[in-house]
Amino acid sequence: MKTIILLFSLILLTATLSFGQDNTAYRESVKQMMIANGTENTFKAIISQMMTTFKAQKTEVKAEVWTEFETSFQKVGIEDLLDLLSPIYQKHLSKEDIDSITAFYKTPAGKKFAEKTPVIMQESMQAGRMWGEKIGADIMNRLTEKGY
């Protein structure tokens, strides 16, 4: 009986360690993808914008405190975000998928796509808003035509 429990414990420990290594490798792949596609820089910019907002609200706080906070959150915040995002990516994409996506972002076309994505997204959101307004107006016009 002791042997069975010991064997079971050893198998469980091995599986846990292997899973942890897989998660660490996967997390690192996600991090590399986020660096390659510019997402990491976007999140860093968001943290900087948040700090600017807080500075405006809390003018009594010394500049060195804000510098300390921003430096800390630039490091820890990104790592915390990776901890949250990695399981989401892992649920939908394999490590090989993530590595292939990262490889794409390292090509000239991938670099250009990463560089242009924020502008494309901004313009697409404006176009989508206009499209939605047009559809909404068309629906209202048709309802009016039908007497509603």
Image (spheres, rainbow, N blue to C red):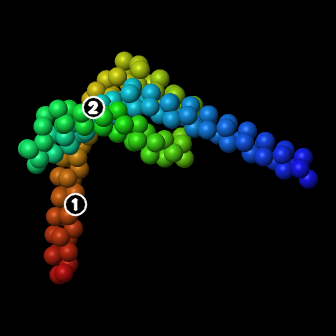
Query: How busy is the neighbourhood of tag 1: few (under 14 within 10 Å), some, or many (20 plus)?
Result: few
Q: CA distance from mark 1 to mark 2?
A: 46 Å
SS of the residue under disc 1: helix
Side of 56 relative to 85 (left or right):
left
SS of the residue under disc 2: helix
Q: Which sits earlier in the primary sequence, circle 1 or circle 2? A: 2
Relative vertical location of residue 101 with respect to residue 46 in this rendering, above or below = above
Please state, as top left, top right, bottom left or bottom right, where the C terminus lies in the image: bottom left
Q: Is residue 79 among the parts visible in the rendering?
A: yes
Residue at figure coordinates x 23%, y 46% from the top left: 125
Side of 28 relative to 133 (left or right):
right
Q: Position of residue 110 (x, y in %)?
A: 38, 24
Q: Is residue 120 among the parts visible in the rendering?
A: no
Q: Nearer the viewer, residue 61 or 109?
A: 61
Q: Position of residue 111 (x, y in %)?
A: 34, 22
Q: Position of residue 6 (x, y in %)?
A: 84, 46
Q: Residue furthest bottom?
A: 147
Side of 47 relative to 107 (left or right):
left
Q: Amino acid at mark 2?
A: Thr
Q: Nearer the viewer, residue 92 or 50?
A: 50
Frontmost of labels 1 and 2 is 2
Q: Which quarter of the figure has residue 14? A: top right
Residue at figure coordinates x 44%, y 27% from the top left: 32
Rendered image: mark on residue 135: 1
Rendered image: mark on residue 71: 2
Residue at figure coordinates x 22%, y 57% from the top left: 132
Residue at figure coordinates x 17%, y 32% from the top left: 64
Q: Amino acid at mark 1?
A: Ile
Query: How busy is the neighbourhood of tag 2: few (under 14 within 10 Å), some, or many (20 plus)?
Result: some
Relative vertical location of residue 18 with respect to residue 54 in this rendering, above or below = above
Q: Position of residue 134 (x, y in %)?
A: 18, 58
Q: Residue furthest top?
A: 108
